[in-house]
Image (cartoon, rainbow, N blue to C red):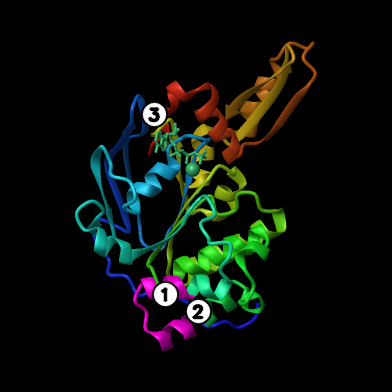
Amino acid sequence: MEAHRSIAATPFIKDPRGMILIENLTKVYGAIKAVDSLSLKVEPGEIFGFLGPNGAGKTTTIRILTTLTKPTSGRAWINGFEVTRQPYEVKKQFGVVQQHLSLDRELTVWEIMELHGRLHHIKSGERRRRIEELLEYVELCEHARRKVRDLSGGMKRKLMIARALLHRPRLLLLDEPTIGLDAETRRRIWQLIRRLNSEGTTIFLTTHYIEEAEALCHRVGIIHQGKLIALGQPLELRLRLGEFAVEVLFDGQVHYHYFQSREEAKAYVRNLPSEIKAIVVRESNLEDVFVELTGRKVEDAENLVG
Ligand SMILES: Nc1ncnc2c1ncn2[C@@H]1O[C@H](COP(=O)(O)OP(=O)(O)OP(=O)(O)O)[C@@H](O)[C@H]1O
Ligand SMILES: [Mg+2]
């Protein structure tokens, strides 16, 4: 990799409440509990993945953390500042990339950055240097004069990340950072996220791509219908479910069974009726955890919250 200057966040002051602390957070929209008694702590330096199906409450959580939506009840802090009571301080702590593209199509890449820098009252000399540095970091230097409407989806996403980093936030919140991107571009964004994290930025990202959570995140929380139903390292969650999976095709449906060891899995297979032929024994993965919890076995999910 070519030598880049670090674009590191300002050093954080460690707060006992961690980088993000969420306590009993609830957001109600009419009859819907978009977020339901959510409690969660993210430590400085983590890449934390908030994984959940459509409508699970991921964006609502991010909107509350970024002061755009008021919670119905409960509290949240970012780097020790409370989101509802200290919004001004809170906004200095984070950069956010929204789920939906929020860029003026008629502005150029440079103008987008320039405007954001002015909003954050970054002085002109420093602003220029910082914009150059960030555009280089996200490989958009050659496109600085192009209008947003002429950029590819991946370039737009990178521009939104660069924009979010302008004021050197300690925490970067990414709502579905790679949605709609091809595999190659997705990997480039992953590299960017890893590098940012290795240089000191805490990352909180939402995704419903399981492989994204597995590839990137130190810890994941699985959210379903507004509730946190699992929390831990990807490997830890897998092991709690069972390290080995047996898939059995029966009655035109695949049935899944989980076991702590390959021997147990094999013993199970040996005892199956001999008419059942389509059987797969494999290692379990985070997708198994996700499907088990958000699909068929949600009622059993409580015991996975570690
Ligand atoms: N402003 C709003 N008014 C009414 N209901 C809302 C509003 N915002 C979100 N909701 C509802 O709250 C629930 C959670 O939505 P949210 O956008 O947080 O989910 P999500 O996990 O981000 O989903 P996706 O993966 O589709 O982005 C959904 O049922 C949604 O319809
Ligand atoms: Mg969302």
Q: Which residue is mark 1?
A: 117
In the picture, measured across the screen, residue 84 lies left or right of residue 124, that is left
Q: Which residues are magenta?
A: 114-130
Give percent across and percent down for residue 161: 52, 64
Q: Would residue 34 be seen by someone viewing this image from the given angle?
A: yes
CA distance separating discs 3 and 1: 44 Å
Query: Residue at 43% of width from left, 30% of height from top?
Result: 225
Pick the front one: 114 or 18:
114
At label 2, the amino acid type is Ile
Residue 124: quadrant of the picture: bottom left
- Helix, strand or loop at label 3? It is helix
At label 3, the amino acid type is Glu
Query: Residue at 43% of width from left, 21% of height from top?
Result: 299
Mark 2 and 1 residues: CB-CB less than 8 Å, in contact? Answer: yes
At label 1, the amino acid type is Gly
State whether residue 124 is above or below residue 37: below
Q: Nearer the viewer, mark 3 or mark 1?
A: 1
Pick the front one: 155 or 1:
155
Q: Would residue 166 be seen by someone viewing this image from the given angle?
A: no
In the picture, measured across the screen, residue 122 lies left or right of residue 178, that is left
Pick the front one: 87 or 223:
87
Give percent across and percent down for residue 115: 45, 72
Query: Residue at 59% of width from left, 50% of height from top?
Result: 212
Circle number at residue 131 = 2
- Helix, strand or loop at label 1? It is helix
Q: Which residue is mark 3?
A: 302
Question: Disc 2 or 1, which lies upstream in sequence?
Answer: 1
Question: Disc 3 or 2, which lies upstream in sequence?
Answer: 2
- Helix, strand or loop at label 2? It is helix
Question: Mark 3 near ligand 1 (CB under 8 Å)?
Answer: no
In the picture, measured across the screen, residue 29 lies left or right of residue 158, that is left
